[in-house]
Image: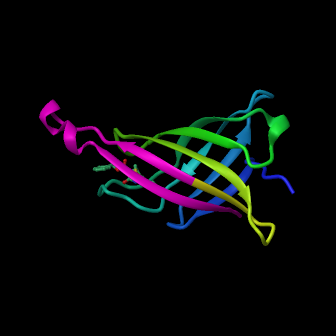
């Protein structure tokens, strides 16, 4: 059983994403709907662009994507791997780096958050 990135995913925080394959070298795009916010701004869907190892090696492929948040000045980069677990379910194990926009360089130290999330196919 192979793990295909295309389609809809939900993570342990309840955030969802939809991935569509762009081309044969594994580039993809999609939409990310986060369910958690560090801001008071209204959360809206945000575009993502990414790439994964060549489709001819779909099984357990590694990938990365960037989310250009539509409701903040932050950028988040995810990286992970697509696994099929013992029950035959497709799981994305990911970690991300969030770069939030700080007002001055002296605040650069507090501009990065790191996180990890597991996604299941919807
Ligand atoms: O979505 C998931 O399930 C995993 C990712 C975690 C939530 C992401 S981090 C960047 C973005 C999303 N939520 C949020 O408030 N964001 C944001 O950009 O807020 C602006 C901000 C961030 C940090 C500090 C202050 C403001």
* Horizontal and vertical percent position of residue 79: 55, 44
Q: Which residues are magenta?
A: 94-122
On-image quarter of the C terminus: bottom right
Residue 58 is one of the magenta-drawn residues: no
Left or right of 8: which side holds 42? Answer: left
Residue at the extreme front? 86
Q: Nearer the viewer, residue 74 or 88?
A: 88
* Horizontal and vertical percent position of residue 8: 70, 56
* Horizontal and vertical percent position of residue 36: 42, 61
Residue at the extreme left? 106
Left or right of 12: which side holds 114? Answer: left
Residue at the extreme bottom? 87
* Horizontal and vertical percent position of residue 32: 56, 49
Residue at left offset 61%, top offset 53%? 17
Residue at left offset 46%, top offset 48%? 96
Q: Nearer the viewer, residue 54 or 71?
A: 54
Residue at left offset 72%, top offset 56%? 83
Colour convention of the picture: rainbow
Image vertical order of residue 51 relative to residue 87, above or below: above
Counting every numbered tag in the picture gives 0
Q: Quadrant of residue 53?
A: top right
Left or right of 37: which side holds 108? Answer: left
Residue at left offset 38%, top offset 45%? 98
Image vertical order of residue 92 relative to residue 48, above or below: below
Q: Nearer the viewer, residue 95 or 120?
A: 95
On-image quarter of the N terminus: bottom right
Residue 103 is one of the magenta-drawn residues: yes
Left or right of 80: which side holds 58? Answer: right
Image vertical order of residue 12 relative to residue 24, above or below: below
């Amino acid at each position: 059983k192979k793990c295909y990135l295309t389609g809809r995913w939900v993570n342990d925080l309840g955030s969802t994403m939809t991935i569509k394959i762009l081309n044969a070298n594994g580039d993809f795009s999609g939409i990310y709907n986060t369910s958690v916010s560090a801001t008071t701004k209204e959360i809206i869907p945000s575009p993502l662009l990414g790439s994964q190892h060549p489709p001819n090696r779909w099984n357990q492929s590694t990938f990365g994507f960037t989310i250009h948040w539509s409701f903040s000045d932050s950028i988040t980069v995810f990286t992970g791997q697509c696994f099929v677990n013992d029950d035959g379910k497709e799981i994305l194990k990911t970690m991300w780096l969030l770069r939030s926009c700080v007002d001055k360089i002296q605040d650069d130290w507090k501009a990065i958050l790191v996180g990890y999330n597991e996604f299941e196919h919807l």
